[in-house]
Image (spheres, helix red, strand yellow):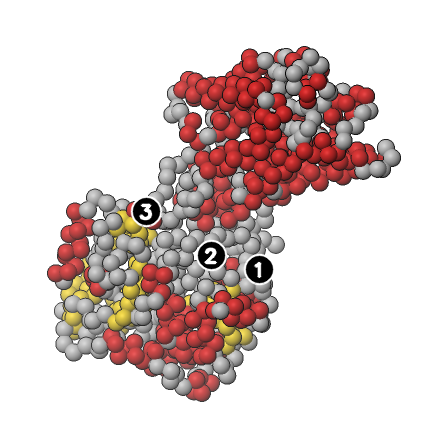
Amino acid sequence: MERLEIMGIFGSKEFPGTGSFPHGIHPPGNKFYSAGAQVEVITVPDKVVLPLLQHIGAPCEPVVKPRQTVACGEMVGEGQAFVSASLHTPVAGKVKKIGVVTLPNGRHLPAIEIKTEGEQQPCNELWEEMTSTDWSLSTIPDYSPDEIARLIHAAGIVGLGGAAFPTHVKVMPNDKRLIDSLLVNGCECEPYLTCDYRLMKEAPHAIVAGALLAGRAVSAKEIFICIEDNKPEAIEALELATRNTVVQVAVVRTKYPQGSEKQLVKAVLNLDVPLGGLPSDVGVALSNVGTMAAVARAVIKKGPLTHRIVSVTGGGIVTPKNIFTPIGISMGELIDFCGGLTEDAARIIAGGPMMGFAFSDLTTPVTKGTSGITILTHAETASGEETACVRCGRCVEACPMNLVPTRLAMAARYKNTALARQYNINACFECGSCTYVCPANIKLVQLIRTGKAQVAAAMKR
Amino acid sequence: MSNLSETAEKVAQGPTLNVAPSPHVADTSFTTRRMMTDVLIGLTPLVAMSVFMFRWLAVQQIAVCVVACLASEAVFVSMRGKKITLNDCSAAVTGLILALSLPATAPWYVGCLASVVAMGIGKIIFGGLGMNIFNPAMVGRAFVMIAFASLMGAGAYENPASAIDAISQATPLTALKGSGISTSIFNLFFGFTNGSLGETSALAALIGGIFLCIRRTASWEIPVGVIACVALLAGLADLSAGANGHLLLHHLFGGALLFGAFFIATDPVSSPLTPRGKFIFGAGVGAFIMIIRLFSGYPEGVMFAILLMNAVTPLINRWTIPRPMGDA
């Protein structure tokens, strides 16, 4: 019944693409762990640790000193470079020290530690504000594009989908690259993760308000919220919330990596982002649904980005949950909030299992780009011994960029940078589809990463 | 805070937590071994048909080749000082395909020698599974075809004194080429004819082959390329010979064409990587088969056609580097 309705929606699609892209894979979604878990609000933690680089670009500079008292939402780090984002504290308290922290991606960074003190803004107030239906869409035309971009910059918003690109750079009005379409990415194609799904279901009005604001900032002619067809309830919620607005819901096929920007542009708009180029080269801006909700709050409520939803999920956690949490809280506290690890927990991953980073230090803080913590069991991570490549070509069939992963991996193994470049190694965006399908268990994408580093080193020489 | 330290403690104690680069999950349903067992399953209709047609001779030939292939793989691999990898089933696949490509009457030492050459020179010498340029079974067969010309040539198939019916006649393609006698399409399709063990039944090859294509163990582009090209060239030959369609079907169902197209040409190791490359490879195999069948002294050309195209595979790979998405 539900299935039929979805097909009905898909059938009535009104976007130029086919809703899909060539190749790709279908790993088990495993969203069932946390998809049904309503967003829960965690209590204010005893302390937060805020790394000074939580985005792509230059680190921000600390603007507070040890022992200084800070209020909720106060700026503690300022992004001075163009591609940089400011940092705000989610708690009121006292700055303890500026120490160092290692993030799951391996970066070793200075971080501001703040001990919670005094009166706090409870997290549930913020969450209620987010889920309210009153986002006064009628006031949106009052904001000028420049003002929207300025407020986004002031709020320190970065992409919440995982890559964490500073959002003000994307929405900055630009005469050279005109934007026709804004795609709001609600695909969440990574297995296990459900934070975007829950946000779409529980706070669709904030997303729509943010999409309208961002669309206005970039002067987009059309705005699509893109959702995979395995999320019927999110589609329904957004269909309702977008009623009487210019925002359209684009239902796309469930496939990995559907949420990758080039693949999504192909699926929805049938445009090819040039090799080595950006979506803006074909007049498209993309942003994640969570980012749009943050934009709505930044512009309409003038609140900085201090909280986000994190999915804690997988077979290795006692009670999988979606948690509205202050940025800077430790991963361990979220795991404890979900009842802790199960006996057979084997690997803790920041993000999803396809592109996330495994880590073991549970004091690691949640950053703006932390979409989830996936805890896999031994059975879920099971992968056999590596055997010989039989050149079956399954990696070629899986690659969403139409590359030849086995050749790229071989080039990396034999340090043949000329071969790697002949086979376009730099077009790989490391989605991991090739490694996922390889029947010989060859770590293709891992080798390709090595190969990219070799090519970069050879170019420098 | 106390809770945090509890979990942290557990993590510190537990030897079971591990880290590794992404992706952290893999498709475990499809492994190299699974591919090889798929081929063995796909070959069962052919094996059944060969036993039905050639009885004890078929059982003997298959046993000799499989055992000899497994043994020679083990010996050669250990001579190279590597770990023995019989459990990937690739040697068993080579043995079975080799056996099915031999005539029923070939003596045991022919199968045995073919196996040794197939594994030694066809495969291990290049570095083992995945590194060989040529299909090992076809290398082994090519060797015995030349070394034991009289035991392997067209004449070897005919044994008027045999107790088994099929072996008393010439193979359909030899009969067609040598004497212009054509076998009934019914017999050709179902396999009630003489020939190498696995090549007689077009139906059995189709059943097993389609299974492999559905499982995506074999790439459909290769058999489609072979069959399309053979159909085209045999169709042209048919037109020039009276156009009754009989010759066309004869070439499609006769000899090792379907067996070769579905089971031998689709060997992933010695065929190209990309779908386009696979189709070109298949079409090349088909073209060589028809050139040999129509113009050479041999009635059949599947083995040579596949070996020739194996040699062209690296070039095809180079010609068919796919254009990455967004490349103008």
Q: Is residue A119 above or below residue A392?
A: below
Instruction: Please tell me whether residue B273 is drawn above or below residue A335 in the rendered image.
Output: above
Image x and y of residue B163, in percent: 65, 16
- In the picture, the disc for residue A257 is 2
Q: Is A176 left or right of A118, judged from the image as shown?
A: right
Three-letter code for the amino acid on which mark 2 is drawn? Pro
Instruction: Kindly indicate the quadrant of the structure image that contains residue A33.
Output: bottom left
Name the residue type under label 3: Ala
Mark with earlier residue (1, 3): 1
Label 1 or label 3, whichever lies nearer to me, is 3
Q: Horizontal placement of A355 versus B157: left or right?
A: left
Task: Please give the chain letter of the residue carrying mark 2.
Answer: A
Q: Which residue is mark 1?
A: A272
Relative to A10, residue A296 above or below: below
Q: Nearer the viewer, mark 1 or mark 2?
A: 2
Q: Quadrant of the C terminus of chain A?
A: top left
Name the residue that disc number 3 marks: A379
The Cα–Cα distance between marks 1 and 3, rounded to whole angstroms, is 39 Å
Q: Nearer the viewer, residue B285 or B168?
A: B168
Mark-to-mark CA distance, 1 and 2:
16 Å
The local secondary structure at tag 2 comes to loop
Q: Chain of mark 3?
A: A
Q: Earlier in the sequence, mark 2 or mark 3?
A: 2
Say which residue appears at 54% left-offset and 49% top-offset.
Answer: A402
Is residue B141 among the parts visible in the rendering? no
Which residue is painted at 44% across and 31% down in the image? B88
Kind of residue indicated by mark 1:
Asp
Where on the picture, by quarter, is residue B43? Answer: top right
Q: Are marks 2 and 3 in contact (CB under 8 Å)?
A: no
